Amino acid sequence: MKITGDLPAPELDPKKTQGTAKSGRAEAVRKVSSQSGDSIELSGRAQELAQWAARIEKAPVAEPEKVDAIRRAVADGSYAFSPELVAERMLSSLSHHPAGI
């Protein structure tokens, strides 16, 4: 299974921006409040990551049987993997990322 970055980037609301003193850049901020009065503010980056997570959850799975088998193996502790290989592939993937993360 290959994961590709062919999903369009989520749109952020430009009306919800505020300047930041440290960077001088405008950053989207969304305030979230609870009934108890507690609140947090999510940065534009946090909102973008939340939007991507929601999109990924809704994306169709190409090989659902294989994904289910891997989930079961991870859950019961029988899934074998190489942490070194995972780290190597993550770093390789990041080096090809268009944003240069």
Image (spheres, rainbow, N blue to C red):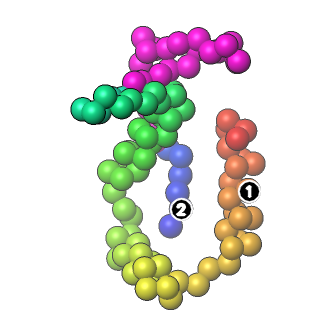
Q: For the point 53% across and 46% down, which residue is it?
A: 5
- Answer with the quarter of the image where residue 20 lies: top right
**50 part of magenta stretch:** no
Q: Report the residue that reaches farthest toward the bottom.
A: 78
Residue 72 placement (x, y as % from top left): 39, 81
- Indicate the quadrant containing the C terminus: top left, top right, bottom left or bottom right: top right
The amino acid type, in three-letter code, at marker 1 is Ser
Q: Tell me the distance, in whole angstroms, between the alpha carbons under discs 1 and 2.
A: 14 Å
In this view, 76 is above or below 50: below
* The one of 17 and 65 positioned closer to us in this rendering: 17
Residue mark closest to the camera, 1 vs 2: 1
**Residue 13 located within the stretch drawn in magenta:** yes
Vertical position of residue 23 compared to residue 81: above or below: above
Q: Earlier in the sequence, mark 1 or mark 2?
A: 2
Marks 1/2 in contact by CB < 8 Å: the verdict is: no
Say which of 37 and 98 sits in front: 37
Q: Is residue 26 left or right of residue 42?
A: right
Crowd rating for badge 2 (residues with CA inside 10 Å; few <14, some 14–19, many 20+): few
Q: Nearer the viewer, residue 55 or 63?
A: 55
Residue drawn 43% across the image and 85% down it = 76
Q: Can the viewer see residue 11?
A: no
**Helix, strand or loop at disc 2?**
loop
Is residue 78 among the parts visible in the rendering?
A: yes
- Dot 1 falls on a residue whose secondary structure is helix
Tell me the residue at 47%/30% (across/down).
42
- The quarter of the picture where residue 52 lies is top left
Q: Residue 18, image x and y in percent? A: 53, 12
Q: Which residues are magenta?
A: 7-31
Q: Residue at x 36, y 31 (%)?
A: 38
**Could you say which disc has been placed on residue 44 in the image?**
none
To which residue does mark 1 refer?
92
Give the labeled residue for mark 2: 2
